[in-house]
Image: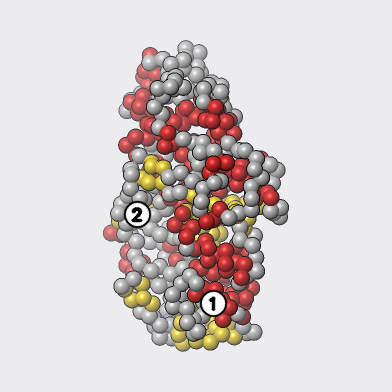
């Protein structure tokens, strides 16, 4: 490596402590969020949070393959927020694989949900964000209220809007070197995977209503938590008028659906639907998936920690009679100091980010402790790269910081996918940016050598 690496182990080191990667696990375990009511951890100290989570999963003696799940709702763009879940699950999966377990990392797509309103922006297959004017927006507008899997891909490439969106997430995961298995809820329903869960729910409507009423409004004694798809117009309906559990069918009426201040018209049809021709509402669907897929671990953003998670735990235990998976709440990160928001335009996609950063740096960002809120400052990505460089040097034993070194020695192989390289060449980010403006490769290399970033004998 170059011999002019900054000596940032001095007491005057101003490396930002908000990005301390090593809010060490014993301290993090003390944090007081409700989703942490997991089995007591082993008390063993770990420098990498993923080991802590793996301990908790192992303590439950899971069947193999161990299943780590994430979930996505199809929407206009696949914001980097989804990647949080991809990467958090990945590090836990990799730690468990290292311990000898077979692990599946799956992502369910809530693609039987209805499209409730038009997205303002969409990402094309390359992850580039376009406006509605650039696609067949009329096709979307005509299909409000229908499941995402029943709506054409507005780019005309895949078999549906849902398939387009699932491909975006899969592509992002591929770009970051993370193997994930996408699972379509629509397909699970079609193959009957949800049949038993639906039968359980519809067999005990009073009990289920009582459980649900603690978490949501509009649960009266006529409420049936099942949404058939209308055989006439294809929309997801909300009015079930009769249930026949023996026959495995419900009677429904295709009534209007109110979404925010808007109304999606029903067609008025009254008909019969089987369990495979409808869906559970999300509050029941999520815990049903845990049983169907045998989920052992699911990370989720803190917005779920207060509402959906407690109800999911209650429903898993008291409706489905099953233990929920090990949870992990991760903090959101902000982008340039503000919340990620595709509607407000504060969004960055993985392809955009990877034009500025190496994948390994993005992986590093998500290896930092999940319970600490962080900002991704697009104008100062050089700082993130500097921190990564320091992390990498620490993994090679070159930084005098005990905590960082303990974290880096354990986490680096999972971040880099390899052992620390002795002869790596890492250019300071700002210098690399200058080189990026030079087209001629020979000139670039000459500049780097002139600046002392490459030793004379570096290949
Ligand atoms: Zn209808």
Image mark for residue 290: none
Secondary structure type for disc 1: helix
Q: Mark 1 and 2 residues: CB-CB less than 8 Å, in contact? A: no
Give the percent coordinates (x, y) of residue 331: 45, 49
Give the percent coordinates (x, y) of residue 246: 64, 84
Residue at x-position 50% and y-position 16%:
458
Q: Can you tell me whether the CB of the residue at mark 1 lies under 8 Å from the nearest atom of ligand 1?
A: no
Give the percent coordinates (x, y) of residue 245: 61, 83
Image mark for residue 210: 1
Q: Nearer the viewer, residue 180 or 387?
A: 387
Q: Nearer the viewer, residue 308 or 360?
A: 308
Left/right placement of residue 85 relative to residue 117 reads: right
Residue at x-position 57% and y-position 64%:
313
Give the percent coordinates (x, y) of residue 258: 36, 76
**Residue for badge 2:** 342
Give me the C-alpha separation between circle 1 and circle 2.
Answer: 36 Å
Instruction: Estimate how packed mark 2 is, as few (under 14), some (14 to 19) or many (20 or more) residues with alpha carbons within 10 Å.
Output: some
């Amino acid at each position: 490596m170059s011999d002019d690496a900054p000596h940032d182990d001095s007491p005057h080191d101003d490396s930002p402590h908000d990005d301390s990667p090593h809010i060490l696990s014993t301290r993090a375990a003390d944090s007081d969020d409700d989703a942490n009511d997991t089995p007591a951890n082993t008390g063993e100290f770990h420098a990498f949070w993923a080991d802590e989570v793996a301990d908790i999963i192992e303590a439950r003696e899971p069947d193999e393959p161990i299943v780590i799940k994430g979930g996505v709702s199809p929407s206009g763009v696949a914001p980097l927020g989804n990647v949080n879940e991809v990467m958090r699950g990945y590090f836990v999966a990799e730690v468990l694989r290292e311990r000898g377990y077979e692990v599946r990392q799956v992502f369910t797509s809530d693609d039987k949900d209805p499209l409730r309103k038009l997205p303002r922006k969409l990402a094309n297959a390359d992850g580039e964000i376009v406006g509605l004017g650039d696609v067949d927006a009329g096709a979307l507008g005509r299909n409000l209220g229908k499941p995402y899997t029943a709506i054409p891909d507005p780019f005309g490439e895949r078999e549906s809007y849902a398939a387009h969106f699932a491909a975006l997430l899969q592509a992002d995961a591929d770009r970051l070197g993370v193997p994930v298995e996408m699972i379509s809820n629509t397909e699970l329903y079609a193959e009957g995977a949800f049949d038993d869960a639906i039968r359980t729910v519809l067999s005990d409507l009073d009990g289920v209503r009582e459980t649900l009423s603690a978490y949501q409004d509009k649960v009266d004694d006529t409420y049936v938590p099942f949404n058939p798809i209308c055989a006439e117009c294809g929309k997801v309906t909300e009015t079930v008028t009769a249930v026949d559990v023996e026959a495995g069918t419900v009677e429904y009426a295709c009534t209007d659906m109110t979404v925010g201040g808007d109304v999606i018209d029903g067609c008025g049809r009254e008909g019969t639907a089987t369990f495979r021709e409808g869906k559970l509402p999300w509050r029941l669907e999520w815990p049903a998936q845990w049983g169907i897929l045998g989920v052992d671990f699911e990370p989720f953003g803190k917005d779920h920690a207060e509402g959906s998670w407690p109800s999911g735990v209650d429903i898993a235990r008291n409706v489905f009679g099953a233990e929920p998976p090990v949870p992990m709440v991760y903090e959101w990160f902000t982008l340039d100091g503000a919340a990620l928001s595709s509607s407000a335009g504060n969004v960055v996609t993985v392809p955009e980010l990877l034009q500025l950063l190496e994948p390994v740096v993005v992986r590093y960002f998500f290896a930092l402790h999940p319970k600490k809120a962080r900002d991704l400052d697009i104008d100062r990505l050089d700082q993130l790269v500097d921190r990564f460089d320091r992390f990498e040097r620490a993994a090679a034993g070159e930084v005098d910081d005990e905590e960082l070194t303990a974290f880096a020695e354990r986490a680096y192989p999972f971040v880099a996918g390899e052992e620390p390289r002795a002869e790596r060449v890492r250019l300071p980010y700002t210098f690399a940016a200058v080189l990026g403006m030079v087209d001629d490769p020979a000139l670039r290399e000459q500049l780097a050598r002139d600046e002392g970033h490459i030793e004379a004998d570096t290949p």
